[in-house]
Each structure stands twice: as structure tokens, then as C-alpha cells.
Amino acid sequence: MRKKTESALPVVVIGAGMAGARLAARVPGVTVVGEERHAPYNRVLLAEVLAGRYTPDVIALPATEVRRGVRAVRIDRADRLVHCDDGSVLRYGRLVLATGSNPVLPPLRGLGATLPDGVHPFRTLDDALALRAAVRPGVRAVVIGGGLLGVSAARALAECGAQVVLVQQGEHLMERQLDPEAAALLRVHLEALGVEVHTECRVRGLRCTTTTTTTTESVRAVQLADGYELAADLTVLACGVRPRTGLAQAAGLDVRKGIVVDDELRTSDPYIHALGDCAEHRSTLYGLAGPALEQADVLAEVLAGRPARYEGTRALTRLTLRSPSAGSFDSPGPPEALDLAAFGEARPLPGDDVIRLADATRGAYRTVVVREGRLAGGVLLGDLGAVSSLARTWQDDEPLPPAMSLLHLLTDDGGH
């Protein structure tokens, strides 16, 4: 039998996350290999699953044919084969690595290769379901990490009735997205939900105990660098993520922090592409859903033989923190849902113009940074009326009209 031509060979995708599923939905005949037992799902909504607001079927993505529970273990670039842990071998014409990222496990005392009972990462649907099964009213939960994921987990656990402590090593919450003023409002909101927040606080280790009937360790407290202990029945690790590059490295592909790709999402092997959390494009790792989906759309065009290039993503971060009852930041009860949006660089550099509008009674805050006549970034909390026009102005990266009042940038119509 004659060997198949390259055009007749299939596209194989390793990874059934949001990026891999999006690509498969746009490229016919793709073979997708995914380690998880679940159908592809929207990981942006994992906190809603933890809070009990959504079930797994609600966050499932449109039907995609996936070989579930199968892990790719080796890539044979010479013969263009993928070897899997179930013994199967897949031949490819083009291979796409959408391997995503793993949660960072911090180097803490008491934290080994096997996690003690009660210690949970928060990255996958199984993580969210395991936490959901373990949490109950009154349980003491410590969330380590005050980024977007940690804040989302803390809010969801508080909704479940847990006594939540959020520990952040940095100066303020969500340092990548928020300026100190916006982070302070976010902290007030979380504290009104009953979340105890500690910033500039370093975790040293975990105190675990072993039951007499089993050798399994269970977490009992989180130990801080100053010697103080936070009692914990549950500990959530939300310390960031690290791209999964092991397969690519073993195959000899160019890997730095992530798998290096060009504007066609092509790796150092012309027959292998990468996208999503594992891909490093122009020295940038995004780690967000928006860029992963945009990369999948571009790659679908490339694989179809149409001209397309990925120029990078100017990503907007949005988050809604819900609560069971209404109020304001100044009221003794929990505030109403807090909407948050952040884009670009919210931290000004010397010479930048900064415009802020704040309304403490309504819990509303807006700030934008203008650099060399262009919108560099901004943060909005509470009232997002201007976010669409601001985001468009920032994404277009065009010089602002000279006659435009900078204050107009923060009006509901975005100055248009």
C-alpha cells in the first residue's frame, strides 16, 4: 500500500482544552487526544461550578469528538507519529500542541509529590468538583494566592458558607491586572462577603497530621513566615500556572518559557504547531482564554491554506463577584455583585497621564493610563458602562484625537 500523502494525513491535536476544542470545531476531520475524562469545557466558569451555580454540563463546550482519558507520551517527528499511553499510535500530517498549563505547586514544607488530604489545586473541572464535594458551611478554607484564580476561588468558597482566608504574598490583590486603588475596593468587597484577606504575607509550609488507622496525611493549618498559623480544613493552591512543555522538549522543539511559535503558530518543526497556554509568541505567554481562542481561529485559517497571521492579543480581563444580598461598599451587609474589567497596563510610568473617577457610595471606580497620546490601559470596577468603547480604543492602538478631553475617556460613551 502506498504511503498517504501529507494532505491526506489527519491533523492531530494534543489537548482538549478550550484552544484544542475551538480548533477542532473549525477544522474538519481533526483527531483530538485529551487526558481529562470530561468533554471539553469552559474553564473560565470553574468558579461557578465550585459555587454550585453551574453543573458540568452547563459549562461544556459545543460537541467535539475527543479521545478522552488518553495521554500522549511521545512524539516521533521523523515518522510523524504520536504514541499514547493506551498503546495507540496516531499518524499526523500536522500536529497541534494544545497541552495547556499545570498549576504551580509552591515549595512549601509539608507539600510533596502527593498532596495531603484537604489540599487542592484549582485548575481543572475535577479540581472544582473535588472542592465542591469537600466544602460545607463552617469549614475553614485557606486560599494561597491572590490573583484572578485565587480571588475567584475565595469568592466561590465563601458562597458555599466556608470561613475563608485569602493569603497573598504581593502588596495587593490581582497585581497583574489592578492598581492599588482598585485592589483596595476589591478587598473591601471580599471582606464584606466574609473573606479574611492577608496581603504581603508569605506562606512557609503546611502542618499536617496522620491518622492512626491510615498513613494518609491531612492538612490542619497553613504556617506563615512570621510563625503564625491559619487553621485549615481545606487549602486551595492558586499560585499561578506553568506551561506544559514536556512533550515538546522531549521531541527537541524550541522551548523557552513556553513552546516557541511564529506568527502562524508554527514551532521549530514546520509540521508542528502550538497554541494556548503552552505557546510562547513573540516572547509572550498569555495564560488566558481570549488569546487561546484567537490563536485557534488563526491556526484554523493557516491549516486551511488561507493567509492568516497571529499578531498577538490585547486581552481584556473581566470578572463578576456575586453575593447573596445587595448593599454598597459603605453598608454593613454584603455588597451587590461587583463587576470588574482590566486591560493593558494599569500601572503608570513616569510621564504618563492618569485619569481617575471614583464614587465610594456606589462602589464605582474607573482609571485609565495614557502614554504618548495612546491609551495604555485601565481598570473599571462597579460600573462598566464605558468598558466597550475604552477596550476598542485600546485595541485599535491609535493616537487619541488631540482635541479630546482625557476626562471624556471615562464617560459612559467612551468619548465618542
Image (cartoon, grey):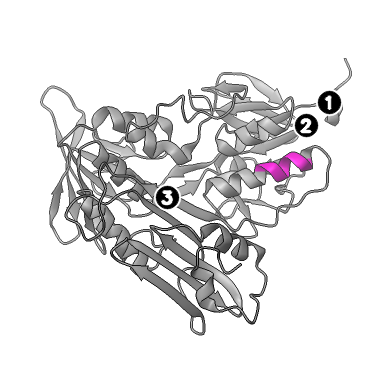
The CA span between labels 2 and 3 is 39 Å
Amino acid at circle 3: Leu
Q: CA distance from mark 1 to mark 2?
A: 8 Å
Label annotation for residue 33:
none
Check if residue 186 falls in the magenta segment.
no
Instruction: Describe residue 153's horizontal placement relative to residue 46 as left or right.
Output: left
Q: Is residue 5 left or right of residue 117?
A: right
Circle nearer the viewer, 3 or 1: 3
Q: Quadrant of the N terminus?
A: top right
**Residue 186, quarter of picture:** bottom left
Choose between 306 and 377: the one closer to the eye.
377
* Quadrant of the image occupied by residue 2: top right
Q: Residues within 10 Å of mark 3 (few under 14, many from 20)?
A: some
Is residue 212 positioned above or below 309 on the image?
above
Describe the element under mark 3 as helix, strand or loop.
strand
In the rendered image, the residue lying farthest to the bottom is 351
Please, which residue is most extreme toward the right here? 2
* Residue 351, x across and y down, in percent: 51, 85
Where in the figure is residue 326, as x and y percent of width and height? Answer: 26, 48
The mark that comes first in sequence, 2 or 3, is: 2
Residue under label 3, please give it. Answer: 319
Image disc number at residue 8: 1
Q: Residue at x 70, y 47 (%)?
A: 267
- Compared with 353, 134 (above or below) is above
Magenta residue span: 296-302
